[in-house]
Image (tube, rainbow, N blue to C red):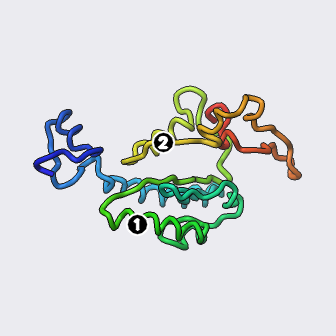
Amino acid sequence: MSIAYRPSHADATYDMKYGVRAVQGGGRSSARETIGRVASGAIAKKILKLFSGTEVLAYVSQVHQVVLPDGSVDHDTVTLDQIESNIVRCPNPDYAEKMIAAIDAVRTRGNSIGGVVTCIVRNAPRGLGSPVFDKLEAELAKAVMSLPATKGFEFGSGFAGTFLTGSEHNDEFYTDEHGRIRTRTNRSGGIQVFI
């Protein structure tokens, strides 16, 4: 690393911007830098659960070309135990095995592959975010996109929403049996006008 820049790493960028070569590793751009977020996120999850009943779950839904089929995970009932039941954190055991095999096939050749993480938030307090400077979508995207190697971020239907018309994409409101206003679909990812 002291002789050549690593492709797609921060070596060249940091050298050009700061005049610093972190030949021992990526320094502030290293994935090791995420440990503080992991620790604080674990505490935040406990606080959210305790004070508002909010539950945050995330699972791997794709590894390279192994894609979990739409609808194969019930977002209303999937549990942390199901997600944590294997090393790739995929709640579908059959697809977890395929993902592990895909990773191993590439890893043994000294290479790596990417994937997709799907995040579910249940019972989020209403009214988070604001329509101008603290847009919830923007704040969440900023947090996730600041993780090393992250290249994309979607809410609800995400980029697939471009294939729908506005009326097809709208989340229709209704009142449930408990008198709560809900939506029949979740194409907006639970966020309406940044709140």
The quadrant in which residue 187 appears is: top right
The x, y position of residue 49, in whole percent, is 60, 59
The quarter in which the C terminus is drawn is: top right
Left or right of 150? Residue 176 is: right
Nearest the viewer among 95 and 134 is 95
The x, y position of residue 85, in whole percent, is 55, 73
Left or right of 27? Residue 87 is: right
The quadrant in which residue 113 appears is: bottom left
Tell me the residue at 60%/40% (across/down).
158
Q: Is residue 39 above or below residue 183?
A: below
Q: Is residue 17 above or below residue 1?
A: above
Residue, disc 2? 152
Would residue 47 be visible to someone looking at this image? Answer: no
In whole angstroms, how far apart are the C-alphas of marks 2 and 1? 25 Å
Q: Earlier in the sequence, mark 2 or mark 1?
A: 1
Left or right of 177? Residue 63 is: left
Residue, disc 1? 105
Which amino acid type is marked by label 1? Answer: Ala
